[in-house]
């Protein structure tokens, strides 16, 4: 019995060390320095887009509440609806905690994603999710601040798809960048990350 | 063999300047029935399809995605080589990838090997059935048939249930 207790204690210690090491590497001081790649705070961004209701919006629209921002396009059959579903699920799980959270889907495909298209598309997901779009020029300015990228890729049938940064950017209520939630990160990691911004 | 036959017949017809159309029609009438018979699908018996599902589409202008798991119960490796679905004018397997910089991209997957006794999942963020040029919208609550084509010229048709646009998995 005593032996078992000792093994359990050693096991627990190993788990704690492993968790700490993981945090150190991923989020902690040991994390790879991605200076220059890290998103600017919202307060240092200067972009202008249009929301699903046709209103002018920009970084200042988001201040005062924590924000989840992500890039995508409505012609995307896999990654984007999955991200939108994930965010809908997170919002649902956070419940009242996420009452004052901005969740914004910014289109990287202004050619096809008009204001009307964005309004229609987001109506199928959590009602708190907004859809912003703009002109090519406006979008180019917007992604710069987030250090995000997008690229139009032609397909053999003459259609095109968009490669784009697919993580979710998390900002706190004063607009400071908190973290990103990588595409398809397990919920048990995503929710604590969002809570850090609340 | 049959294709060769058609070619020979067609060429013969083309060379004859008179009654070209009638000749061509006659040639097709002779060859087509046997051609159709030769293309009778051979059902696949070694692959089991588990949990197929698709997300509802927003009209027909956007490509839709469908997912499923393939289990190989046979004793030979077999590959998924393609897809067909009446609801899609152009269906194929695509693969989403996210690189070290967090940039996601999507491209045709090519043939996908299903190991003996193993499974291959078409799931969000990885392989998916990409249904382009939709002929009709995918409506929540309905199903549509989709045919999987395999490397040994066999095929398998499954009914794919359509869930909501915000569905996350085969449970809806």
Image (tube, coloured by chain):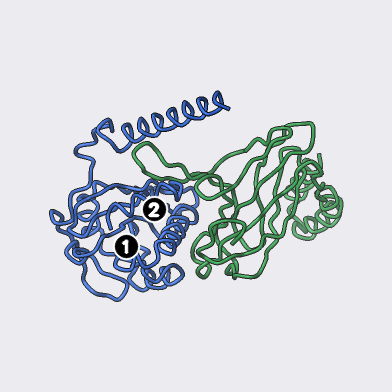
Chain colours: A blue, B green
Observer-side mark, 1 or 2, equals 2
At a point 41% along the width and 30% down the height, the residue shown is: A18
Horizontally, is A102 left or right of B96 in the view?
left
Instruction: Pick whichever, A70 or B2, lies toward us.
Output: A70
Q: Where is residue A157 in the image (x, y as percent from the top left)?
A: 50, 52
Q: Which chain carries label 1?
A: A
Q: What element carries label 1?
A: strand
Q: Position of residue A25 (x, y in %)?
A: 32, 31
**Image quarter for residue B84?**
bottom right
Horizontally, is B71 left or right of A77 in the view?
right
State which quarter of the image contains the C terminus of chain A: bottom left
Q: Is mark 2 on a helix, strand or loop?
A: helix
At a point 33% along the width and 63% down the height, the residue shown is: A103
Instruction: Pick whichever, B32 or B51, lies toward us.
Output: B51
At a point 56% along the width and 62% down the height, the residue shown is: B55
**Image quarter for residue B170?**
bottom right
Instruction: Pick whichever, A71 or B170, lies toward us.
Output: B170
The residue to which callout 2 is attached is A191
| 1 or 2: tag closer to the N-terminus | 1
State which quarter of the image contains the N terminus of chain A: top right
The residue to which callout 1 is attached is A104
The label number, if any, that marks residue B33 in the structure image: none
Q: Position of residue A104 (x, y in %)?
A: 32, 62
Q: Are marks 1 and 2 in contact (CB under 8 Å)?
A: no
Residue A78, above or below B100: below
Q: Position of residue B101 (x, y in %)?
A: 34, 39
> Local crowd at mark 1 within 10 Å, few (<14), some, or many (≥20)?
many
Q: Which chain carries label 2?
A: A
Q: Which residue lies furthest to the top in this view?
A: A3
Q: Which residue lies furthest to the front in this view?
A: A2
At a point 65% along the width and 50% down the height, the residue shown is: B83
Query: Residues under labels 1 and 2: Cα distance?
Result: 17 Å
């Amino acid at each position: 019995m005593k032996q078992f207790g000792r093994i359990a204690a050693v096991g627990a210690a190993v788990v704690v060390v492993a968790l700490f090491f993981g945090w150190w590497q991923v989020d902690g001081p040991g994390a790879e320095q991605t200076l220059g790649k890290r998103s600017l705070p919202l307060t240092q961004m200067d972009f202008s887009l249009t929301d699903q209701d046709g209103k002018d919006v920009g970084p200042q629209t988001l201040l005062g509440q924590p924000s989840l921002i992500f890039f995508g396009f409505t012609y995307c059959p896999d990654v984007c609806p999955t991200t939108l579903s994930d965010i809908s699920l997170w919002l649902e799980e956070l419940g009242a905690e996420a009452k004052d959270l901005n969740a914004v889907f910014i289109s990287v495909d202004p050619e096809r994603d008009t204001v009307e298209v964005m309004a229609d598309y987001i109506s199928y997901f959590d009602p708190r999710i907004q859809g912003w779009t703009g002109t090519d020029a406006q979008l180019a300015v917007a992604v710069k601040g987030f250090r995000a990228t997008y690229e139009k890729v032609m397909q053999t049938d003459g259609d095109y798809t968009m490669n784009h940064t697919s993580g979710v950017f998390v900002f706190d209520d004063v607009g400071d960048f908190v973290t990103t939630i990588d595409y398809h990160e397990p919920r048990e990691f995503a929710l604590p990350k969002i809570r850090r911004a609340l | 063999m049959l294709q060769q036959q058609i070619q020979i017949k067609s060429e013969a017809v083309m060379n004859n300047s008179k009654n070209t159309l009638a000749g061509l029609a006659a040639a097709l009438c002779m060859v087509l029935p046997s051609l159709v018979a030769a293309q009778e699908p051979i059902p696949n018996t070694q692959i089991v399809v588990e949990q197929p599902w698709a997300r509802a589409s927003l009209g027909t202008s956007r490509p839709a995605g469908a997912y499923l798991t393939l289990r190989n119960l046979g004793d030979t490796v077999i590959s998924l080589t393609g897809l067909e679905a009446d609801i899609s004018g152009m269906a194929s397997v695509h693969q989403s990838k996210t690189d070290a910089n967090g940039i996601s991209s999507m491209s045709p997957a090519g043939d996908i090997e299903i190991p003996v006794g193993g499974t291959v999942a078409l799931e969000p963020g990885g392989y998916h059935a990409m249904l382009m040029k939709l002929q009709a919208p995918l409506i929540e609550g309905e199903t549509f048939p989709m045919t999987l084509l395999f490397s040994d010229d066999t095929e398998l048709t499954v009914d794919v249930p359509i869930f909501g646009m915000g569905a996350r998995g085969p449970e809806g």
